[in-house]
Image (cartoon, rainbow, N blue to C red):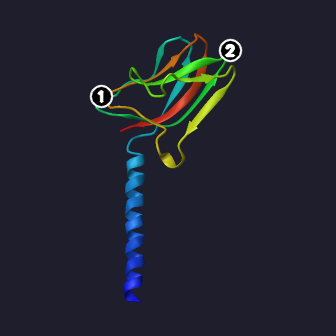
Amino acid sequence: MKRIIFTALFSFLLTLFFYQSINAQMFVGTVKKAEIDIATADDNEIIAAVTGKSIVITHMSILNNVGTSQTVIFKDGATSINGSGFALAGNGGYTFDAPGGVHVIRLSASTAFNINLSAATNLSGYVIYYED
């Protein structure tokens, strides 16, 4: 009986320790917000690079504010994160959210978060992130 209680207590404490450890790793920095309001058919810097730190995006909402579709490419500096991008329908939008604070996108250290547009039409929204 003592062995069962000890095992249950040990399992509980181990779970609690790992849970707190994982939560501490999820939010290491101050949560920040960057506005998106771009209309250039090229790379558009959304979040500037921070020397020695990675940008960790936990939520992003974007809206194509015109009636024509365009291709949107997310970039880790100059490197595409989502291949050749995805088509965003005219007047359409997307929300990228990571439940529980897990990241949607984690950039390489010392790189900016850029969005490349295929058309010179307005894309708006916001990004929630922290630096790690």
Where residue 39 sits, quadrant-wise, is top right
Residue at 36%, 34% in the rendered image:
54
Q: Is residue 128 above or below residue 115?
A: below
* Eye-nearest disc, 1 or 2: 2
The location of residue 41, given as percent across then percent down, is: 53, 11
Q: Give amino acid for label 1.
A: Thr
Residue at 38%, 23% in the rendered image:
77
Find numbered disc 2 in the image and state the secondary structure of the residue it sits on.
Answer: loop
Q: From mark 1 to mark 2, how far is it between C-alphas?
A: 37 Å
The location of residue 27, given as percent across then percent down, is: 42, 46
Q: Is residue 15 above or below residue 57?
A: below
Q: Is residue 55 above or below residue 112?
A: below
Find numbered disc 1 in the image and state the secondary structure of the residue it sits on.
Answer: loop
Q: Nearer the viewer, residue 41 or 28?
A: 41
The residue that label 2 is drawn on is 68
The residue that label 1 is drawn on is 51
